[in-house]
Image (tube, helix red, strand yellow):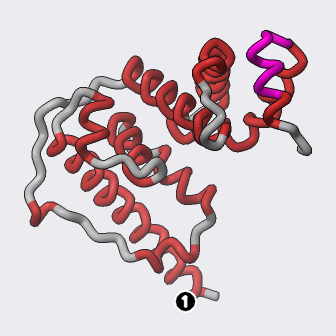
Amino acid sequence: MDINTAILIEGCRQNDVLCQQQLYKFCYPDMIKVCYRYANDMDGAGMIFNDAMLKVFKGINNYNDKGKLLGWIKTIVINCCIDFCKKKTIFNRSVDITEEDEIIIFPDVFDRLSGKDVQQLISQLPAATAVVFNMYLYEGFTHRQIGEQLGISDGTSKWHVSEAKRILKQKLEKISETEIKANAAG
């Protein structure tokens, strides 16, 4: 979409409904994917996106035109995703991890999977673990930042990431075993 963001932003600041609709449609393809990672269904993703865009429209006067508009909006979307997950998920606040608990998944395992396949595997994780793993993997939050956002300890954040890796490793091993059996039979 060819879009003049300066005009669009000014229109949104003036509460112009057409500009708001354009911004909503412009953001939707990229941001709904972020929302879906946290909601795991389109209804939840739509609720998060609508909530985020409402906050964007209410806070558009706070956007200072110094950064990228989509980056500013994505920050709001991620915060809405986190709020959505905090309402739905109870986080264990006191789990710690030791160094020997660290699980390693070799990157070449993902070469055989599409992004959609990986997201499907992540969506099968326990809810709290999936939230922390998404924040760590996709959004690049540190364990300290995750802890602050979710009200959990750094150790609990590390445990969730490790648990996600452990579960994903088991699922990936099953996929590999199935492929090996299929190749041997074929």
Where's the N terminus, which quadrant?
A: top right
> What element does badge 1 sit on?
helix
On the image, the x and y values in percent for residue 169 come to 35, 65
Residue in the picture at 39% in, 71% down: 173
| Residue extent of the magenta highlight | 8-16
Q: Name the quadrant containing residue 67.
A: top right
Name the residue nearer the viewer: 19 or 158: 19
On the image, the x and y values in percent for residue 27 come to 74, 36
Three-letter code for the amino acid on which mark 1 is drawn:
Ala
Local packing at callout 1 (Cα closer than 10 Å; few below 14, some 14-19, many 20+) is few
On the image, the x and y values in percent for residue 165 come to 32, 59
Does residue 89 appear to the left or right of 15 in the view shown?
A: left
Name the residue nearer the viewer: 75 or 83: 75
Does residue 125 appear to the left or right of 119 in the view shown?
A: left
Where's the C terminus, which quadrant?
A: bottom right
**Number of disc labels:** 1
Q: Is residue 42 visible?
A: yes
What residue does disc 1 label?
184
